[in-house]
Image (tube, rainbow, N blue to C red):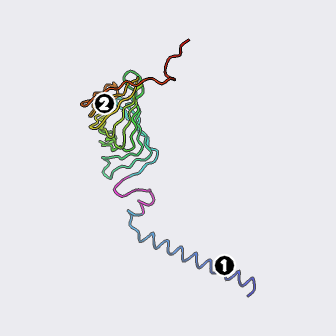
Amino acid sequence: MSPRRIAKFLAGFGAIALVILLVATIWIVRHRSATQVLQTAAGLVPGTLLRAHNFHWTQMKAGERQWVLTAGEADYSADKTMLKLTDAVVTMVSSDGKPVVVNSPHADLTMNGNHVTKAYLTGGTVIHFGDYVLSTDSATFMPDDDKVEAPGLVTVIGDGLKVTGVGLSGHPKTRVFELHTQVQTEVMPKKDSEKPKQS
């Protein structure tokens, strides 16, 4: 077989393969449901309306910024009343001007339109407020009331103290927190790097 015949044969074979591939693609697309097409195109997971990466939300009230929320991923529920977040971080400023930062691996937000009414934080919640760090397994945050509640073991570390207790209620904006039961306080010695230098 001459090289010219081989080239014609390969060209014809390629054209036929291309037509078969095109027909198969059209058939597959036409026989898929609209939901499957939308889910694949948008990268959605079942039961969600929308998935967002590098999520960013600023909550405003009366023209003033209340807090800023960021997350690695966010999934809206189909009825738009719930928002599930991964690696959530809430940042706000307390009434005395100091930053308050809340970190949580998982957060389920209850929504009323474009307004967050409640946030349920799980997976190990950590709240940085001023010189103190508060940690607990789970907590519920009600932003309209500036209220946070945690039912389990809570640890607060800062200013040379470690305080533990079970159950907490508090107000992040005013940085006022109260432990309910089994409260224990431990004085932590300062590290050499924290001690004042003597001249």
Q: Nearer the viewer, residue 107 or 67?
A: 107
Please tell me the numbered disc located at residue 58.
Answer: none
What range of the chain is rendered magenta?
A: 37-49
Residues at circles 2 and 1 in contact by the CB criterion of under 8 Å: no
Q: Nearer the viewer, residue 134 or 145?
A: 134
Q: Amino acid at mark 1?
A: Ala
Mark earlier in primary sequence (2, 1):
1
Taking the image as drawn, is residue 130 in sight? no
Circle 2 sits on which residue?
146
> SS at mark 1?
helix
> SS at mark 2?
loop
Residue 83 location, x and y as percent?
A: 35, 46
Residue 162 location, x and y as percent?
A: 36, 28
Residue 31 location, x and y as percent?
A: 41, 71
Q: Is residue 21 left or right of residue 156?
A: right
Q: Amino acid at mark 2?
A: Asp
Query: Disc 2 and disc 1: Cα gap in Å?
Result: 72 Å
Which residue sits at x=33%, y=43%? 109
Residue 75 location, x and y as percent?
A: 38, 49
List the single residue furthest toward the left.
Answer: 181
List the single residue furthest toward the top.
Answer: 199
Quadrant in which the N terminus is drawn: bottom right
Taking the image as drawn, is residue 12 in sight? yes
Magenta segment: does it hold 5?
A: no
Circle 1 sits on which residue?
11
Quadrant in which the C terminus is drawn: top right
